[in-house]
Image (cartoon, grey):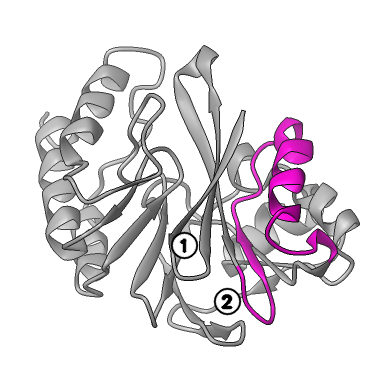
């Protein structure tokens, strides 16, 4: 079942829980003059996500489709969305565009965003941050909405299970539980830990986000800078040891 919740002004969380993997897959819709969908979900989720979007805006009017990196839950249904929304343009890093997106999933060429570049959708402005290997993949990036100070942070802060839509309670402990469990099974090293990881996370913390919009789990509202620093400490603890 797909659930829709408004987690901030004009920011809607569309979540589908998949029991087989005990995980929610979340898309975020920004309702504005030029609506933006962040994450498409996998192709199999397209009918449910399309129906959920139709409760909020005309799906054919989606103008921008963003995602962090090339992966099925990030942009697997991009082609379906571009068929449904004739003006929808993918926005991603130059690496994502050139290496994967335009060749594999896009019906129309993606618009690459440079590090620090801003995209305006009407009332809201989104700054693109290039974040290679954070959360993972060479082509990774994130969007930071500057009015409400919302960080669309992809897989960071993953919380397994069927969570609430929004929380003001810390989410790092559930992230730690997930990371430790994954390290013991086939999903080990789901998040890489490299020499630049902490510097990248500190750059995100320096944005001082009020809202952390994560793909898997509850959207967190609170001291985003502290939460990101706490997350960095967990990654160092679990992944940084020899």
Residue 147 as seen in the image, left or right of residue 175: right
Quarter location, residue 206: bottom left
The residue nearer to you, when weighing 160 against 30, is: 30
Image position, residue 232 (x, y; %): 16, 49
Residue for point 80% across, 53% down:
81
Name the residue that disc number 1 marks.
141
Residue 142 as seen in the image, left or right of residue 79: left
2 and 1 marks in contact (CB < 8 Å): yes
The quadrant of the image that shows the C terminus is top left
Seen in the picture, residue 103 relative to 71 is either above or below; the reply is below
Kindly state the secondary structure of the residue where label 2 is placed: loop
Tell me which segment is drawn in magenta.
Answer: 31-60
Residue for point 80% across, 69% down:
61
Image position, residue 220 (x, y; %): 29, 52
Circle 1 Cα neighbour tier, 10 Å, few/some/many (<14 / 14–19 / ≥20): many
Name the residue that disc number 2 marks.
113
Image position, residue 33 (x, y; %): 68, 82
Q: Is residue 108 magenta?
A: no
């Amino acid at each position: 079942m797909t659930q829709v919740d408004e987690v901030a002004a004009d920011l809607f969380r569309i979540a589908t829980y998949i029991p087989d993997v005990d995980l929610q897959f979340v898309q975020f819709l920004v309702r504005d003059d030029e609506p933006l969908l962040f994450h498409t979900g996998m192709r199999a989720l397209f009918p449910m996500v399309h129906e959920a979007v139709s409760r909020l805006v005309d799906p054919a009017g989606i103008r921008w489709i963003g995602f962090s990196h090339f992966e099925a839950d990030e942009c697997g249904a991009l082609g379906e969305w571009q068929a449904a929304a004739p003006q929808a343009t993918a926005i991603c890093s130059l690496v994502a565009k050139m290496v994967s997106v335009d060749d594999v999933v896009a019906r129309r060429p993606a618009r690459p965003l440079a590090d620090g570049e801003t995209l305006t959708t009407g009332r809201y402005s989104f700054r693109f941050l290039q974040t290679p290997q954070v959360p993972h993949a060479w082509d990774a990036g994130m969007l930071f909405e500057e009015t409400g100070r919302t960080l669309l942070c992809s897989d960071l802060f993953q919380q397994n299970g069927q969570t609430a839509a929004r929380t003001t309670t810390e989410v790092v402990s559930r992230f730690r539980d997930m990371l430790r469990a994954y390290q013991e099974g086939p999903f080990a090293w789901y998040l890489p830990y490299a020499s630049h990881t902490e510097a990248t996370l500190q750059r995100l913390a320096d944005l001082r986000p009020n809202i952390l919009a994560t793909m898997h789990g509850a959207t967190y509202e609170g001291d985003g800078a502290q939460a990101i620093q706490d997350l960095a400490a967990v990654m160092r603890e679990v992944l940084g040891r020899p």
